[in-house]
Amino acid sequence: MKLLATTLLVLLFNFTFAQVTFKVNNFSKDYYGKIFIADTSEVFSKGWVAIYDTKSQKQIIKVTAEELALSLHDGKALANIKQLPYGEQSSIMYEDYNFDGIKDFAIEDGQNSCYHGPSFKIYLATKNGFKFSPEFTALAQNYCGMFQVDYKTKKISVMTKSGCCWHQFSEFIVENNKPKVVKIVEEDQMEYPYNNYSEENWDGKKMVLTSKRTINLDEDGIKTILSFTVDKKQKRVVLFNINDRTLNYALIDKNDEVEFSYPINTVYQNPDFTLDKKNNTVTFKNKDVVYTIYDNNDSIGITINTGEKTYNWIGNSTTKKGKLTDITTTQLDNVVVN
């Protein structure tokens, strides 16, 4: 009985902590690969990935990793599966990365890309074998998983993100056998309800930046209190609250881009605004400039006092939506009522 128990324990131990080496031979007649997994009971395991020359049987590349994640297909490990950005990505990829017509290797070296995703080391094919490329490897380490290759445009694309609301997309061409960035797009929605978009493009001499900031006033939790246009300036003034907690101001130009907003930071400093019920005005101060929005029976607009000059932007009353007194229907944290 004791011998049987010991035997079962040994079998259980071997089953739970199995070390396995998979052969991968579905990607080339000239090369094959091996993937060693130290502990198949773990989702991520120590191991290594190696490439061998089929004719000589010599090992030509070997990459060790603290964390390998391996998906099997009918019990086999396959190369060249690349479901971007978050799907399955093989530990071995055999593709042309520098557009010279010769296939190169991407070998998984762990989970070092964004959000603990797979990362790769890139080995470019040369006349003297495969040479490690730190520049191409950076593209497979510093973004989200492996990069995308477009052979028609001869461009490489990568993506990275932070949470739900910040994404960056970049494009590279290949010059002197190295990737060169030619486009960077950032989409930033971290500052709800504002959308910040920027784009950098290579014009042949330098990267040129363009950007715009917009606002979605139809977002859940956004209530427009007062809005009107200033025809002379071709701008729109909007007062709105967020989640019935804070009052906010936005100045929107004719292209629907936000020219100025207040509070400057999403974390407000109470009080941001002062409501004068007697004169039906709302005032706020940004640095040394004082803004006063007025809403009377016969006039609507905003005055801007810089300390040296006062400007009066008269609003078009026919474009008016809402009314200033609606501020008092909800107790807002960053408004003082006089």
Image (tube, rainbow, N blue to C red):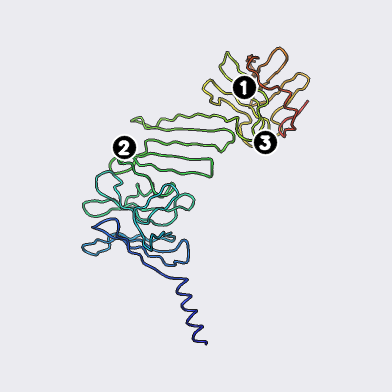
Q: Position of residue 242 (x, y in %)?
A: 66, 34
238 up-or-down from 313: above or below? below
- The residue that disc 2 covers is 153
Mark sitting on residue 243: 3
- Rounded to the nearest angstrom, the CA distance separating label 3 from label 2 is 46 Å
Horizontally, residue 231 falls left or right of residue 337, namely: left
| Nearest to the observer: residue 23 or residue 56 | 23
Residue type at the position of mark 3: Asn
Residue type at the position of mark 2: Thr
Q: Position of residue 335 (x, y in %)?
A: 72, 30
Q: Quadrant of residue 326?
A: top right
Q: Position of residue 53 (x, y in %)?
A: 24, 61
Q: Earlier in the sequence, mark 3 or mark 2?
A: 2
- Rounded to the nearest angstrom, the CA distance separating label 1 from label 2 is 44 Å
**Disc 2 secondary structure class:** loop
Q: Quadrant of residue 57?
A: bottom left
- Which is closer to the viewer, label 1 or label 2? 2
- The residue that disc 1 covers is 237
Q: Earlier in the sequence, mark 1 or mark 2?
A: 2
